[in-house]
Amino acid sequence: MFTIDRASIVRAFCDECVWLYCLRKHFADLFEGNDGRRRLLAEVAGTFFHDLNLVLIDYLLLQQCKLTDPASSGKNKDNLTTNYIVALDWTPTTAQVLASANADIMSFRAKIDDARRKLVAHLDLRARLQTLDLGSFSPDDETKFWAALQTFVDAAHDEAIGGPFDFRVAMPAGDVSSLIHALKDAVDYEDIHGQDGAFLLSRHGQRRFDDA
């Protein structure tokens, strides 16, 4: 029989939360900036960034639902989810915190589950052709989801391992800012050599990634 200790389960769950928040942060850094950011992405590669926006939205919804799926999908098919974590052996105090936080988490899931089932994990004909409004939620709804998930993670980590676990701080350093900086420089470069032919000649053959 497959067995694993509670601490290892909680660590693995925390890793999934870090990954989920990392994806959300990438999306925010890319697509929730000012008008200048949107114009930059549209000018550099409008179709690509438009498609990437949609891909990240789909994947975020999928990951949020995966993290809140039922504890099991059948015999010997346990799922690493909030519902599985809740069902582990906890002290009464921790169990109460986990159950309360999970209720808020599942409330958010209810808003996005139809989008996951009918448009992300499957392509429901009626939903696709009628362009049904699925997966809608307010900024406040999402804020409550992340707060509840952090409360959930802190409670489980505190008892199983020791101390809280801030999955936002644990997220590896992103490089979206480096990408945006490079895109800004690239646009400036195009402007400069478009105005100054001598500059373009001076740079000929000196690009470090000319063969990329």
Image: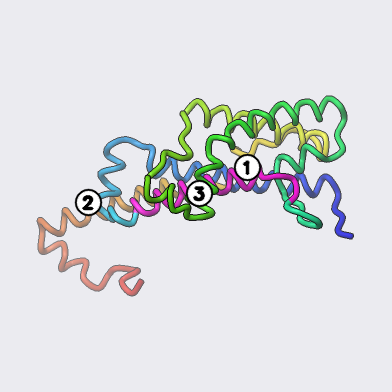
In the rendering, at what x and y percent does residue 55 appear? 44, 52
In the rendering, at what x and y percent does residue 180 appear? 36, 48
- In which quadrant will I find the C terminus? bottom left
Residue 170 numbered tag? 1
Mark 2 or mark 1: name the one nearer the start of the chain. Answer: 1
Q: Amino acid at mark 2?
A: Asp
Q: Amino acid at mark 1?
A: Ala
Residue 129, magenta (yes or no): no
Query: Where does label 3 land, which residue?
Result: 118
Query: Where does label 2 land, which residue?
Result: 188
- Please name the predominant secondary structure of the magenta segment in the image: helix
State the CA–CA distance, disc 3 to disc 1: 33 Å
Q: Name the residue nearer the viewer: 165 or 143.
A: 143
**Residue farthest along the front direction in this orientation:** 126
Q: Name the residue nearer the viewer: 200 or 168.
A: 168
Q: Report the number of numbered marks.
A: 3
Q: Residue at x 27, y 70 (%)?
A: 206
State the CA–CA distance, disc 2 to disc 1: 35 Å
In the rendering, at what x and y percent does residue 67 appear? 65, 45
In the rendering, at what x and y percent does residue 174 appear? 50, 48
Q: Residue at x 50, y 49 (%)?
A: 118
Does residue 211 appear left or right of residue 123 in this picture? left
Q: Which stretch did the figure color magenta?
A: 49-72
Q: Nearer the viewer, mark 2 or mark 1?
A: 1
Does residue 49 appear left or right of residue 120 in this picture? left
Which corner quadrant of the image does residue 102 belong to? top right
